[in-house]
Amino acid sequence: MLKAARPAQEHQDVPPITALIPQARREQGLTQRELADLLCEISQNDSVTREEVSRWERGKRIPGPYWRAFLSAALDVPHAAVDKAATIARETRRATSEDDSD
């Protein structure tokens, strides 16, 4: 008897956003400051700093939907992959905090 094929997970190989941002940033040849400057330029919103990019990369913060759209453009990564990476990071954070509370 044939087994039903398991549905392919969308973006199965997407890392958490804490890994995706620095990896894609380095592939683009950008420093954290240059990425922040580029995000400010393309969004026409100067509220992102190098420190905020660092927080995203260290997992201290997860970029919201607004910044994920611009990260996608700046890093040349599909928007769906950036969203999935943020979801993975959020799920990992929740699992870790639940483990710590046991």
Image (cartoon, rainbow, N blue to C red):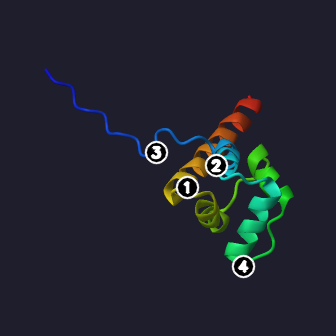
Residue 55: x and y, percent? 81, 51
Q: Residue sitting at 73 percent across and 67 percent down?
A: 38
* Earlier sequence position, callout 4 versus callout 3: 3
- In three-dimensional space, the C-alpha distance between marks 3 and 2, rounded to whole angstroms, equals 15 Å
Q: Residue sitting at 74 percent across and 60 percent down?
A: 35
58 displayed left or right of 11: right
Q: Which residue is mark 1?
A: 77
Q: Residue sitting at 71 percent across and 30 percent down?
A: 99
70 versus 78 height, above or below: below
Q: Are marks 2 and 4 in contact (CB under 8 Å)?
A: no
- In three-dimensional space, the C-alpha distance between marks 1 and 4, rounded to whole angstroms, equals 20 Å
Mark 4 crowd level (few <14, some 14–19, many ≥20, 10 Å Cα): few
3 or 1: mark nearer the eye: 1
Mark 1 crowd level (few <14, some 14–19, many ≥20, 10 Å Cα): some
- In three-dimensional space, the C-alpha distance between marks 1 and 2, rounded to whole angstroms, equals 8 Å
Q: Are marks 1 and 2 in contact (CB under 8 Å)?
A: yes
**The N terminus sits in image quarter:** top left
- The secondary element bearing badge 2 is classed as helix
**What type is the residue that disc 3 sits on?**
His
Residue 23: x and y, percent? 66, 44
Q: Which residue is mark 3?
A: 11
Residue 67: x and y, percent? 67, 65
3 or 2: mark nearer the eye: 2
- In three-dimensional space, the C-alpha distance between marks 4 and 3, rounded to whole angstroms, equals 29 Å
4 or 3: mark nearer the eye: 4
Total marks placed: 4
Q: Which residue is mark 4?
A: 44
